[in-house]
Amino acid sequence: MSNILIIGAPTIDDINGRKAIGGPGLYGGLAAISLGCKAHVLGPLGSEDPSPMIIYKKLNIDYLGPIKSGCTYTFKHRYIAIKKRRKSEIVCRSSSLSVDDLKKLDDIDIDIILVSPVHCEISPNLIKWLYIQNPTKIFLIDLQGVIRCFGDNWVSFFTSMGGVYHVSSDDINEAPPLKGVVSYTHGLEGGWVFVNKGEMFRLPRPDKIIEDPTGAGDIFFVLFACLYAKSKSLRSSFLRSAELTPFLLSKIKMKVLNVSKGVL
């Protein structure tokens, strides 16, 4: 069994007027558990509303903290059916992670590290530091929050790094030219995977359409990570994760909804 660490803030999401708990640790954590991986989550949570921590615990996701003063990251997501695109607005921002927060991970046995910020909770310098400190681990970065935080300047922070990246067409118009492996997903169109050796292959279009795809990218990337940790095959792991994501997303959303009753 692999142990995955997901670094990203728990969130409170307003999705087309419906309130829900979210964050990469929630969706990704449940995806990891579905494949027999142990999920640990590190991300700042505001003391004003710790309800995500209650949900994570109920779902057997190991939330490591830290709890900081202030609010929890809160998003307003609006899905535009005609354009099949998402528009997101940050309503409240939580505090950022520090080196001391990351050093608390030294005693935890981890095989996979996924850095998946929702906005600015971890700086590019800290991501680089973490990457250098963990040369033997599978290291993944979801770029969504980095792009939200730094806009067009984000790419300059990662040109010298390897690893495995994920980004979607909601956040950028084309796959970025980075070292390592880049998975670029495009909603109903499927996606592409690019490898720095020149290899490229297509990700299939989803067989099942989900009206609210919040969390799909988190599930897809964590499924890949856990599958790859076992098989060491990029192609088969990405293709299998793309196949599983739409079906697992529906199950996870129902599970979270049931556990959230009486908490939100």
Image (spheres, helix red, strand yellow):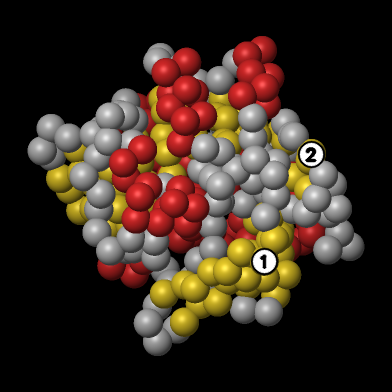
Occupied quadrant, residue 37: top right
Occupied quadrant, residue 63: top right
Alpha carbons under labels 1 and 2: distance apart: 19 Å
Which residue is found at the position 42% from the left and 34% from the top? 140
Residue 255 point in image, percent of width and height: 69, 57
- Per the rendering, the mark at residue 91 is 1
The quarter in which the C terminus is drawn is bottom right
The quarter in which the N terminus is drawn is top right
Given residues 49 and 54, the one toward you in this image is 49
Which residue is found at the position 60% from the left and 43% from the top? 121
From this viewpoint, is residue 214 visible? Answer: yes
Which residue is found at the position 42% from the left and 18% from the top? 132
Above or below 80: residue 252? above
Within 10 Å of disc 1 (Cα), the crowding (few <14, some 14-19, many 20+) is few
Above or below 66: residue 45? below
Residue 164 point in image, percent of width and height: 34, 35
Residue type for callout 2 = Ile
Give the left or right position of residue 122, taking residue 222 as reference: right
The residue positioned farthest toward the right in the image shown: 262
Residue 166 point in image, percent of width and height: 37, 46
**N-term-proximal mark, 1 vs 2:** 2
Residue type for callout 1 = Val
Above or below 135: residue 116? below
Give the left or right position of residue 110, taking residue 47 as reference: left
Q: Which residue, given by chain and number where applicable, does mark 2 sit on?
A: 67
Give the left or right position of residue 31, taking residue 191 as reference: right
Q: Secondary structure at mark 2?
A: strand
Above or below 78: residue 100? above
- Per the rendering, the mark at residue 217 is none
